[in-house]
Image (cartoon, rainbow, N blue to C red):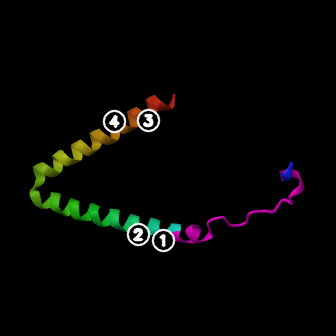
């Protein structure tokens, strides 16, 4: 009954500070992932052509596997 007597107020900003920081943290995480990706690709490229080919095949198989699982779980 108390809910009916209390005036309704619009909530404009619940976590305003977190809302402002969220894009910054996404940028930091994205930069870190990009850095690790570049370092790992450079290291893999130094190991030679055969390892690069194997890595590309494994990556392609993983992408195809995730796509198949996604299609199967979608239906």
Side of 29 where 38 appears, left or right:
left
CA gap between label 3 and label 4 equals 9 Å
Q: Residue at the location (84% across, 59% down)?
A: 8
Q: Observer-nearest residue: 29 or 11?
A: 11
Residue identifier under label 1: 24
Q: Observer-nearest residue: 73 or 46?
A: 73
**In the rendered structure, which segment of residues is drawn in magenta?**
3-21
Count residues near mark 4 (Cα–Cα under 10 Å), then give few for <14, some for 14-19, many for 20+.
Answer: few
Count residues near mark 2 (Cα–Cα under 10 Å), then give few for <14, some for 14-19, many for 20+.
Answer: few
Q: Observer-nearest residue: 44 or 22?
A: 22
Q: Earlier in the sequence, mark 3 or mark 1?
A: 1
CA gap between label 4 and label 2 equals 29 Å
Q: What percent of the width, then of the height, locates residue 31? A: 37, 68
Residue identifier under label 4: 65
Residue identifier under label 2: 28
Q: What percent of the width, then of the height, locates residue 34? A: 33, 64
Membership of 10 in magenta stretch: yes
Residue identifier under label 3: 70
Q: Are marks 2 and 1 in contact (CB under 8 Å)?
A: yes
Picture quarter containing residue 17?
bottom right
Q: Are marks 2 and 3 in contact (CB under 8 Å)?
A: no
Judged by depth in the image, the label closer to the viewer, 4 or 2, is 2
């Amino acid at each position: 009954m108390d809910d009916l007597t209390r005036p309704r107020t619009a909530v404009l900003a619940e976590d305003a500070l977190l809302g402002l920081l969220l894009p910054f943290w996404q940028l930091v995480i994205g930069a870190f992932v990009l850095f690790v990706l570049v370092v790992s690709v450079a290291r893999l490229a130094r190991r030679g052509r055969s390892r690069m080919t194997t890595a590309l095949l494994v990556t392609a198989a993983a992408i195809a596997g995730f796509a198949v699982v996604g299609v199967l779980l979608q239906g």
